[in-house]
């Protein structure tokens, strides 16, 4: 018996054209998927399109995706994970040479804006494709400037040199409020921060961690953490307490997920019952001569994570737990996490537009794979099973119910303290009229942005390809 595949047919708009005039056709779709699967290209999409076996092109306007297994995410995998590439431009270039090619420096797309020029480490410019099959965008051109650091980017907006910044930090809000020409807008993001416990002994991976290997101890530490107060003191109004390894924007997330409550009295009782007793005048706890102490690692480059660590340090001190905050260069911290040689670390994860990636971050596979990013080595087959079932469920209500059970399972196991879910807060000049902003791609509706004629300033009317104001060169802000 031959192999059986699920399929999904996609019909292309016959009016769609690449910016060089060539029509967008099904062979472009097939070429894109084949190229992404080529290991020599090193596409970041390759690991997330593994369910796509191949693409056929029965005619020029029909692409048929063939999947290894039927899934409610077939359409998402087909149209979201990859940007379609024009075969007539790229087919003569070996995939391993794409990044360094002239084609990469002069990209040809099919959207409502076309590429004009790129100034390395400074800016790139797009101009409206007025003949686009989806209609001409309302803004005639876009210039994206690249700042050497975050504060420089904010300063450019405050000084009127730039019109939009995609994310403010809490310390920027007061200064922005002093500029009546600026506005802010908030939107839930696909990101959350957490304190991850290492459940394995950093000195010997085959053994459980001497502190965090105990589920009840982890729950006690979670109970001693006032997450509401932490979010308010660190983020102000730019975040809400995290719900778990998920975000509120997902339809699979129940916003009323049961949490381990903040309860200092009960946390102390739990620590007592586990044998961690207050032993001296300093109020710190120990058991069998071992102090209840651990190191909390954070990247020194993240002011927010450092602030969260200091708050956690003080909150846990109130129940007799000593926390040593360790600030590390980001690459050093990542190496410790990959090698599982840390006690605890404050991390931040940003997800795609669907919840599948929580399995890589908190599932068994992500724990045991050499390249996995479940650095805390949390493993519970019940959690994995609920996530797998949720991903396979077609009915939305059943899908949400299964994910709720998965999240409830991991929340009660407490492999992490779920800290904050940031709220994306953009700043922009008031003359710009924004459209809706998607959590996964705030920029997707830029073609609908517009500026009233009586609000325009001179640079709004500058013809395309005019030299933008000189900006100091520097690496792109992370």
Image (cartoon, rainbow, N blue to C red):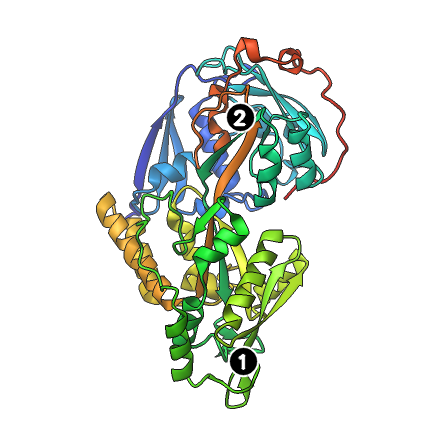
Which is more foreground, mark 1 or mark 2?
A: 1
> Going from the N terminus, do you reach mark 1 or mark 2 first?
2
Q: Quadrant of residue 464?
A: top right
| Residue 215 occupies quadrant | bottom left
Residue at image coords 49%, 58%:
194
Is the residue 130 above or below the residue 118 in the image? above
The answer to which of 133 and 400 lies nearer the viewer is 400
Q: Nearer the viewer, residue 299 or 236?
A: 236
Quarter of the figure with the C terminus: top right
Residue appearing at x 66%, y 53% in the figure: 301
Residue underneath mark 1: 284
Q: Secondary structure at mark 2?
A: loop
Disc 1/disc 2 C-alpha distance (Å): 64 Å
Tell me residue 273's x, y (percent).
38, 83
Count of numbered circles on the image: 2
Residue drawn 43% across the image and 67% down it: 222
Q: Is residue 235 above or below residue 115?
A: below
Percent position of residue 23, x then y: 48, 17
Residue located at (32% from left, 35% from top): 8
Label 1, residues with CA under 10 Å away: few <14, some 14-19, many ≥20: some
- Residue beneath disc 2: 86
**Residue 258 located left or right of residue 233:** left
């Amino acid at each position: 018996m031959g192999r059986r595949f699920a399929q999904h047919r996609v019909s292309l708009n016959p009016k769609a054209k690449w910016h060089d005039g060539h029509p967008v056709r099904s062979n472009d779709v097939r070429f894109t998927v084949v190229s992404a699967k080529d290991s020599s290209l090193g596409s970041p999409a390759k690991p997330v399109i593994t369910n796509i076996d191949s693409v056929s092109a029965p005619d020029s306007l029909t692409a048929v995706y063939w999947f290894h297994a039927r899934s409610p995410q077939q359409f998402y995998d087909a149209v979201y994970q990859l940007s379609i590439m024009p075969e007539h431009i790229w087919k003569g270039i070996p995939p391993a040479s794409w990044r360094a090619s002239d084609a990469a420096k002069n990209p040809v797309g099919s959207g409502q804006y076309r590429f004009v020029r790129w100034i390395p480490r400074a800016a790139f410019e797009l101009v409206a494709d007025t003949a686009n099959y989806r209609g001409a965008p309302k803004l005639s051109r876009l210039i994206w400037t690249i700042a050497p650091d975050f504060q420089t980017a904010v300063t450019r907006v405050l000084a009127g040199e730039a019109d939009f910044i995609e994310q403010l930090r809490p310390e920027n809000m007061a200064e922005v409020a002093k500029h009546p020409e600026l506005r802010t807008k908030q939107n839930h993001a696909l990101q959350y921060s957490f304190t991850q416990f290492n459940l394995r002994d950093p000195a010997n991976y085959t053994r459980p961690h001497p502190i965090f290997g105990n589920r009840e101890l982890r729950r006690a530490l979670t109970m001693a953490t006032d997450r509401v107060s932490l979010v308010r003191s660190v983020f102000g109004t730019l975040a809400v307490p995290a719900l778990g390894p998920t975000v509120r924007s997902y339809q699979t997330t129940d916003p009323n997920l049961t949490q381990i409550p903040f309860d200092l009295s009960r946390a102390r009782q739990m620590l007592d019952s586990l044998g961690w007793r207050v032993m001296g005048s300093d109020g710190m706890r120990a058991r069998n001569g071992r102090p209840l102490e651990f190191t909390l690692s954070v990247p020194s480059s993240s002011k927010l994570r450092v602030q969260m660590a200091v708050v956690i340090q003080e909150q846990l001190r109130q129940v007799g737990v000593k926390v040593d905050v360790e600030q590390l260069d980001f690459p050093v911290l990542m190496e410790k996490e990959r090698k599982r040689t840390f006690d605890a670390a404050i991390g931040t994860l940003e997800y795609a537009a669907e919840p599948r990636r929580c399995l890589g971050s908190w599932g068994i596979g992500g724990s045991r794979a050499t390249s996995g990013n479940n650095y805390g080595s949390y493993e519970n087959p019940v959690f994995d099973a609920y996530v797998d079932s949720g991903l396979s469920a077609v009915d939305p209500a059943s899908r949400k119910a299964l994910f709720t059970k998965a999240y409830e399972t991991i929340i009660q196991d407490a492999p992490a303290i779920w800290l904050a879910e940031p709220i994306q807060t953009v700043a922009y000049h008031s003359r710009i009229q924004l459209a809706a902003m998607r959590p996964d791609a705030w920029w997707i509706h830029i073609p609908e942005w517009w500026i009233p004629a009586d609000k325009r300033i001179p640079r709004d009317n500058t013809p395309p390809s005019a030299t933008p104001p000189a900006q100091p060169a520097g690496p792109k802000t992370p």
